[in-house]
Amino acid sequence: EVVLTQSPATLSASPGERATLSCRASQSVRSSLAWYQHKPGQAPRFLIYGASTRATGVPARFSGSGSGTEFTLTISSLQSEDFAVYYCQQYDNWPPWTFGQGTKVEIK
Amino acid sequence: EVQLVESGGGLVQPGGSLRLSCAASGFTFSSYWMFWVRQAPGKGLVWVSRINSDGSSTTYADSVKGRFTISRDNAENTLYLQMNSLRADDTAVYYCARDLTGNVFDFWGQGTLVTVSS
């Protein structure tokens, strides 16, 4: 099973700042990595797939990078609606489809 | 507009059963793999089960294998999760999600809460 480790667990930042979230895989997942945004009481939102391709309708301030075992989600300038929990998910080696434990982006 | 609406959650005693439903609309349901993903209180997202487009192939997480059954009715555009022998650690919000051909989940429902407690 591929284990995904996200860091930091919590990121405190102010609106307008840049946020950098990390996801590390226990073995190579090539570029088969996705990112999701999740707010309490809402459906998770699909952001990125193929490590770097934005899903339809996702603002350009969200960007993904990396391959193999090291991945990054960058939010270039945090907006109020971006404060949420972010999860990475691998789909290279399944089953199981695995998620990281999440990074909470909170208002500083 | 793609919509996924879960129902069927509630409070159930340990050892009991529950059947979750996920009503799909806004897309050709029969063309997509579908998944169930859960989130225990204060925890992250965990994949539970997956079914292919015609229902002929299913996969389960080890934690639910032999207790949960995923199925679908393509005529009714509905996904199901039959949960038997429920345990306290099955307590979670259960989400259904659509597969964007490639095993990523492009649309999710709002979730339904299952609480297993005596």
Image: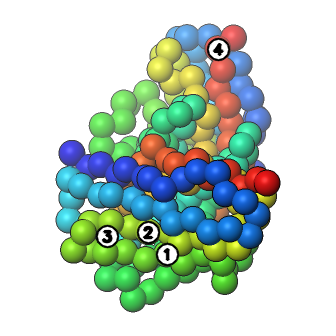
Q: Chain of mark 2?
A: B
Is residue A104 in view from this perspective? yes
Cα separation between marks 3 and 4: 38 Å
Question: Could you tell me which residue is drawn at 72 percent across and 55 percent down?
Answer: B116
Q: Which residue does the numbered mark 3 point to in the structure image?
A: B32
Residue B92 tag number = none
Residue A79 percent across, percent down from the top left: 48, 16
Cα separation between marks 1 and 4: 39 Å
Residue B58 percent across, percent down from the top left: 49, 82
User: Secondary structure beneath disc 2?
Assistant: strand
User: Secondary structure beneath disc 3?
Assistant: loop
Q: Can you tell which of label 4 and label 2 is closer to the viewer?
A: 2
Residue B103 percent across, percent down from the top left: 46, 67
Q: Are marks 1 and 4 on the same chain?
A: no
Q: Which residue does the numbered mark 2 point to in the structure image?
A: B80
Question: Could you tell me which residue is drawn at 55 percent across and 11 percent down?
Answer: A15
Whether the residues at callouts 3 and 1 have beta carbons within 8 Å, the answer is: no
Q: Which residue does the numbered mark 4 point to in the structure image?
A: A107
Please give left or right for residue A19 compared with residue A55 in the image.
right
